[in-house]
Amino acid sequence: MRTADAELPGLEEKTRFLLSADSYPEGTGSVCLMETHMARLFLTDNLVYKMKKPVRFNYLDFSSLDKRYGVCSEELRLNRRLTDGVYLDVVPLRLTAAGTLSLGQSGTPVEWLVKMRRLREEDCLAQQIDRASAHSLAPLLQRLQDFYRAAAPLPLSAVQYLARLQQRIETVRSGLRTPALALDGVEIDGLAARLVAFTRSHSALVGKRAENGHIVEGHGDLRPEHCFLTEPPQIIDCLEFNRDLRCVDPLDELCYLALECELLGRPDLCALIVGRYSEDGAPDPSLVHFYQCYRAFLRAQLAAAHLLDEEVPNPDKWRHKTRMYLDAAARCLPAR
């Protein structure tokens, strides 16, 4: 019989346990908590334990223990595609017969954690951005290129791909137009309209990405903070909870990475990053602008979504990010 979440220890009780250095069977001198919209990460001296929050949104559902086990298992499987020895296991947090929580003893699983090897933060591209060069990025970009070229193309027609992009643009527009956000509706509607107009006026250019077999199951969240310039490079934290959002044009993902590098002060890296994956020759500049505008628009909506949480620890941070991405979308608007 499955245990209902209401009968399990709560999120805060589990968090208190995992914040104690004595809770870890391998031992650690300290534990540091990092929090995202959907998870809490507990960083020990050498490992990371990632616990999903029991949340449900329109694009994911972590509301039950069984669902969290499933998504943890997917996270392990998917992230092993672009890492080596980083994603170690899915481990149970158990409730013992004595009524205590344990990571090592027998008992009833009350949570599932993704166990990872801790990478050095100073090795991530976000930290290395000022020193990033063609030489230092070459192994990372080669690994991504090999990954994309080995991926099976999705059977998606041009019409289907265009419709999917248009629907996603509308979903983002609708999210940003949520009245509680009090954003400029004229600005948001204008950005969405320009993006949709591009998919129509350049339907052959965009649609052939699908017709030529370039849509694959990719990473889904290719940001500098997820790329580690180690030997070999490691690319972590893919979008594991929604396959549809993970199925992308590799050029789209690389444009996203280039956009994030630009926002960190390195616009000069764009040509290097997007030019590396050149299956049909150099990418059309207007398509690069379209994908970067689309990604900035999407990131604005994701940042703004934090402002709709019941508790917002740092609302100014998310307002700033929303504004930053809307400005980036305006800068990247493709030609009509």
Image: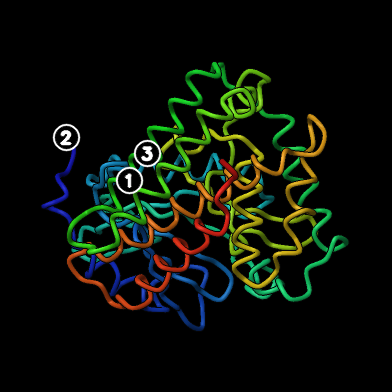
Tag on residue 68? 1
- Quadrant in which residue 234 is drawn: bottom right
The reply to whether dot 2 and dot 3 touch (C-beta < 8 Å) is: no
The amino acid on which the numbered mark 2 sits, given as a three-letter code, is: Met
The amino acid on which the numbered mark 1 sits, given as a three-letter code, is: Arg
Q: How many marks?
A: 3
> In the rendering, at what x and y percent does residue 138 appear?
84, 55
- Quadrant in which residue 202 is drawn: top right
Of the residues under marks 2 and 3, which one precedes in the sequence? 2
Query: For the point 65% across and 38% down, which residue is it?
Result: 250
Can you tell which of label 2 and label 3 is closer to the viewer? 3
- Residue 296 placement, left or right of 270: left
The amino acid on which the numbered mark 3 sits, given as a three-letter code, is: Gly
Rounded to the nearest angstrom, the CA distance separating label 1 from label 2 is 17 Å
Colour logic: rainbow
Helix, strand or loop at disc 3? helix
- Residue sticking out furthest to the right: 135
Rounded to the nearest angstrom, the CA distance separating label 1 from label 3 is 5 Å
Query: For the point 23% across and 63% down, which residue is it?
Result: 181
- Quadrant in which residue 280 is drawn: top right
Q: Quadrant of the C terminus?
A: top right
Check disc 2: other Cα within 10 Å, few if <14, some if 14-19, many if 20+. Answer: few
264, 91: nearer the viewer: 264
Helix, strand or loop at disc 1? helix
Check disc 1: other Cα within 10 Å, few if <14, some if 14-19, many if 20+. Answer: many
Rounded to the nearest angstrom, the CA distance separating label 2 from label 3 is 17 Å
> In the rendering, at what x and y percent does residue 85 appear?
66, 52
Query: For the point 66% across and 56% down, which residue is it?
Result: 258
Tag on residue 70? 3
Tag on residue 1? 2
> In the rendering, at what x and y percent does residue 70 appear?
37, 39
The reply to whether dot 1 and dot 3 touch (C-beta < 8 Å) is: yes
